[in-house]
Image: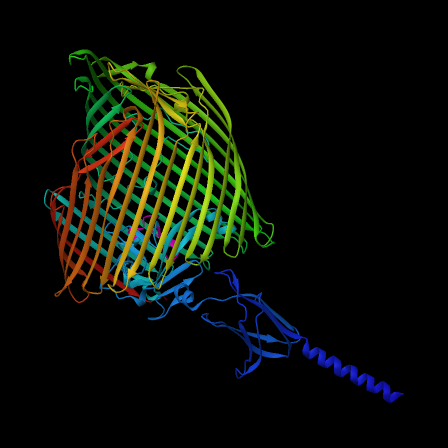
């Protein structure tokens, strides 16, 4: 009996041991998510890690799944193979703790796709794809002595830099350039790309930078900025470098630039200065916000009313922007400092900018005003002399309070002084060419502006993964004081061309405007599941503003002391906005879907002291939004979206401020105006393949407006005077659209990069003219081809050309339109010659054909060229002789249609000159201690 019991016990022990040995297993699923397929019959091999000998193998089922049982303890290698796919290899261990390994879904990549999307071998891996970031290894590209970052960027596949420094990467415009992850002189990319030395660069990273809010929550809010991050070499993070440029030219022209940089470990200090009257303004003056911006007009978050301090007349200060119109004289300077400390938990980034800009010039405008049964043709000339001086100081401080919370504080202040002098002369004629009216007008204005902005952004991560909240607070304070003179003389003529009436306005005007805007927003993110999250937010906005405008008539010549109450006003406005929103965000594998809405309740109260009148208005805005994105791969995606929003009428449209700077155009109010509603749809597709250097970008947009606010214009045909009032359009739906295709690819057998782009856009709008509904249609169609090539130390060139066709017509005068052909093109090249000599040239061509509205065509070719000689072994001294606008054809020109009017504009700009310049690069860089 004891023997039987012992035998049973031994048998049970043996079975248990066998069962325990066979309890080890491996399983998973083999798939290709790019093709949304399971890899049936894929080979799954288990190798011994010690000597790579085969231990077990099987094949995947029709669903791609596999399971291998009867495994044992030990270290193994999982090897997956499938025809035309890259092998998948993964080490794993089975022991008493991990008896079963579940690899879940293993995503295989084809060999071709892996080569395109993951890495290009050669020269220390010239290009790598890391998630959504494309990284270029600067050491894999040959550069010339004293090349700048923009010279390095031109060598990267899929990246172009034009002669003005504009960067296009994979079909998208780069609007932000960072240095080691930090902003450098704010948002002006050219201050980095045109001044930082190429030999200092280790890596260049290209990615889509999310907003602070999206980067924190992980929920895509659709706000993306194409960004470059310049990572410096370790031995280039300590020392100094800089550049000095100076040039003199014919026609008393000149330009100069000095820049000095000193880097030490995690500190960067830079100074720069520019002075020029050739059109090189240094900073991006076209972006008002980069250098101070600000005015007494404040637009509120998400649907608040636009408050204007008293009507946009010609006495408002000049914005200080230069778009190529007129002759500029610019002097700019700035300083930058940034540092990190406390194990990078704290950082400071600050900038100071100072500059002045004076622009003088003339502008001629020809306008065709289409009426129901007649036409009024106007010709006006404007002489300008505008000056702006401004300063701005900004600082950003960031601190990591602990492992779950961060605080970012931003503060900036600016001071501006402007002086403007404008002289207008115009004549209007009837369709039979008889004189209708004439105007002489002079406007002088001096003004000072102050602005201060503060914001704080606090983020906090909670215990549950994905659960977090953030708080943002901001306040903006601005003040504006200006004074100036207005003189206007208007004459009116009968059909026989004899003047029968003259009106004269001679006044002194003052403006004082103040504004205080407070905004707050709290956002809470709750993960509902691994794929779905809910974002809730609440915002409060408060605005208190005042605008006091006074107009004075002269009691005696030169003594302006009689208040004109009709054209004086003193407005006080208060606005309170409460906003709440809920946005759902679904993200799984390659799909991202977002949908939700925001609702805001607005209370507006305005009081005018001179008339003792008040205006109150309360309304609700609804702003739904939805977007869908699918990423086929790391470099290919499709996106579509919708947004809707309420557009409230402005205070001026409801209750206009009376202005008399232009007696021929008189605004009227309409307190019965209702809000309009905008609907906008967009779709885009982009794809980039590194190996073939092929990029495709497709985009389309369509929007329409319900209950749109349009102009109801009444024109007195006997005088040419116009009264305009805003009304709601109830029986028509205005719309606009655009579509764009851009394809770029390397043509291998020629060694040339080629590109094709197609573009179309248009709109249909409405307005009333003398009680008749006018429909304005405008369409543009264009095509473009481009070719470029770069040959190291020999030459490089870029060429583009394409035709375009424009249609512009109004229903009031169907037999008169502005339809016509046009073309534009350009080319630039560089040729490297022996003796360190370099030739450069660029040209731009523009053609606009004559139309029924304008009897003359327009042709312009702007051709520039230069020859330079470099000296010394380092080639850091360069002398250049250059010519600008060699054919002397640089004349500003444009045509457009607006409402029932077709306009042609021409203006003065900088023409031909020859310049001799010298540039010197210097540097001394060492290893960071």
Magenta stretch containing residue 368, yes or no? no
**688 left or right of 529 in image:** left
Q: Residue furthest top?
A: 500
- Residue 471 to residue 651: above or below: below
Locate the C terminus by quadrant.
Answer: bottom left
The answer to whether residue 555 is seen in the rendering is yes
**Where residue 268 appears, x then y in whole percent?**
34, 56
User: What are the residue bounds of the magenta stretch?
Assistant: 176-191
In the image shown, does 225 or 844 lie closer to the viewer? 844
Relative to residue 807, is residue 837 drawn left or right?
Answer: left
Q: Residue at x 34, y 40 (%)?
A: 289
54 relative to 659 in the view: left or right: right
Q: Quadrant of residue 261?
A: bottom left
Q: Is residue 600 placed above or below 792 in the rendered structure?
A: above
Residue 407 x, y percent position in the rendering: 49, 49
Q: Nearer the viewer, residue 388 or 88?
A: 88
């Amino acid at each position: 009996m004891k023997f039987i019991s012992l035998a049973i016990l031994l048998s049970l022990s043996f079975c248990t041991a066998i069962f325990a040995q066979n309890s080890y297993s491996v399983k998973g699923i083999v798939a290709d998510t790019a093709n949304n397929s399971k890899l049936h019959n894929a080979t799954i091999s288990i190798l011994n890690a010690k000597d790579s000998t085969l231990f077990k193998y099987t094949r995947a089922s029709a669903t791609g799944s596999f399971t291998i049982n009867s495994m044992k303890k030990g270290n193994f290698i999982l090897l997956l193979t499938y025809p035309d796919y890259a092998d998948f290899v993964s080490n794993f261990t089975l022991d008493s703790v991990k008896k079963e390994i579940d690899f879940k879904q293993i995503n295989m990549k084809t060999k071709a796709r892996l080569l395109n999307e993951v890495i290009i071998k050669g020269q220390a891996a010239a290009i790598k794809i890391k998630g959504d970031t494309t990284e270029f290894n600067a050491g894999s590209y040959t550069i010339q002595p004293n090349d700048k970052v923009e010279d390095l960027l031109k060598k990267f596949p899929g990246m172009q830099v034009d002669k003005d420094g504009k960067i296009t990467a994979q079909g998208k415009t780069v609007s932000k350039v960072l240095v080691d992850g930090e902003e450098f002189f704010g948002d002006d990319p050219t201050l980095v790309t045109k001044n930082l030395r190429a030999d200092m660069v280790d890596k260049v990273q290209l990615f889509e930078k999310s907003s602070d809010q999206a980067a924190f929550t992980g929920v895509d809010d659709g706000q993306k900025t194409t960004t470059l991050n310049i990572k410096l070499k370790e031995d280039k993070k300590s020392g100094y470098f800089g550049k000095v440029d100076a040039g003199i030219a014919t026609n008393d022209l000149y330009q100069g630039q000095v820049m000095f940089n000193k880097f030490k470990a995690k500190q960067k200090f830079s100074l720069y200065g520019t002075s020029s009257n050739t059109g090189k303004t240094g900073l991006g003056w076209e972006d008002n916000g980069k250098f101070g911006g600000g005015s007494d007009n404040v637009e509120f978050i998400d649907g608040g009313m636009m408050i204007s301090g008293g009507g946009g007349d010609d006495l408002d200060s000049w914005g200080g922007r230069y778009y190529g119109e007129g002759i500029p004289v610019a002097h700019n300077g700035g300083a930058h400092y940034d540092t990190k400390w406390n194990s990078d938990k704290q950082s400071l980034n600050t900038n100071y900018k100072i500059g002045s800009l004076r622009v003088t010039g003339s502008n001629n405008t020809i306008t065709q005003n289409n009426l129901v049964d007649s036409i009024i043709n106007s010709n006006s000339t404007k002489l300008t002399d505008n000056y702006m001086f401004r300063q701005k100081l900004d600082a950003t401080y960031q601190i990591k309070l602990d492992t779950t919370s961060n605080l970012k504080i931003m503060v900036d202040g600016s001071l501006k002084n402007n002086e403007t002098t404008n002289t207008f002369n115009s004549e209007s004629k009837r369709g039979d060419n008889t004189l209708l009216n004439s105007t002489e007008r002079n406007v002088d204005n001096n003004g000072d502006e102050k602005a201060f902005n503060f914001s704080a952004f606090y983020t906090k991560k909670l215990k549950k993964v994905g659960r977090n909240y953030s708080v943002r607070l901001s306040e903006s304070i601005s003040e504006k004081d200006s004074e100036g003179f207005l003189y206007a003389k208007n004459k009116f003529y009968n059909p026989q061309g004899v003047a029968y009436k003259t009106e004269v306005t001679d006044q002194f005007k003052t403006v004082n405007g103040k504004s205080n805007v407070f905004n707050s927003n709290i956002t809470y993110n709750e993960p509902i599941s691994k794929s779905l999250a809910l974002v809730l937010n609440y915002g409060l906005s408060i605005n208190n503003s005042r605008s006091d405008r006074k107009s004075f008539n002269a009691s005696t010549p030169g003594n302006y002391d009689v208040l004109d109450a009709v054209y004086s006003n003193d407005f006080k406005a208060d606005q309170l906005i409460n906003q709440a929103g809920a946005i759902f965000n679904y993200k799984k594998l390659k799909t991202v879907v977002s949908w939700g809405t925001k609702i805001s309740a607005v209370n507006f109260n305005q009081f005018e002291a001179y008339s003792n009148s008040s205006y109150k208005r309360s309304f609700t805005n609804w702003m739904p939004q939805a977007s869908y994105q699918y990423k086929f791969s790391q470099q290919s995606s499709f996106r579509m979206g919708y947004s809707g929003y309420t557009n409230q009428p402005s205070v001026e449209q409801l209750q206009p401020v009376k202005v008399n700077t232009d007696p021929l155009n008189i605004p009227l109010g309409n307190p019965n105006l209702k809000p309009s509603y905008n609907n906008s749809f967009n779709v885009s597709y982009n794809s980039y393949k590194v190996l073939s250097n092929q990029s495709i970008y497709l985009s389309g947009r369509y929007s329409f407006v319900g209950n749109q606010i349009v102009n109801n214009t009444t024109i007195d045909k006997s005088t040419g005077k116009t009264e305009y009032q805003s009304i709601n359009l109830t029986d028509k739906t205005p719309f606009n659209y655009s579509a764009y295709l851009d394809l770029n690819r390397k043509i291998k057998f020629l060694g040339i990069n080629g590109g094709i782009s197609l573009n179309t856009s248009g709109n249909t709008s409405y307005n009333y003219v003398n009680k008749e509904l006018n429909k304005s249609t405008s369409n543009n169609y264009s095509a473009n081809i481009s070719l470029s090539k770069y040959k190291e130390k020999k030459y490089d060139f870029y060429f583009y050309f394409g035709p375009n066709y424009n249609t512009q017509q109004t229903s009031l005068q169907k037999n008169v339109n502005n339809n016509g052909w046009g073309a534009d093109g350009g080319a630039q090249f560089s040729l490297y010659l022996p003796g360190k000599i370099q030739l450069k040239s660029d040209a731009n061509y523009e053609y606009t054909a004559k139309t029924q509205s304008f009897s003359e065509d327009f042709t312009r070719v702007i051709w520039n060229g230069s020859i330079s000689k470099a000296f010394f072994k380092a080639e850091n001294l360069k002398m250049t002789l250059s010519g600008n606008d060699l054919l002397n054809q640089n004349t500003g020109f444009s045509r457009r249609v607006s409402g029932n009017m077709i306009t042609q504009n021409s203006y003065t700009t900088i023409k031909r000159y020859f310049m001799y310049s010298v540039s010197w690069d210097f540097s001394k860089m060492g290893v960071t201690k």
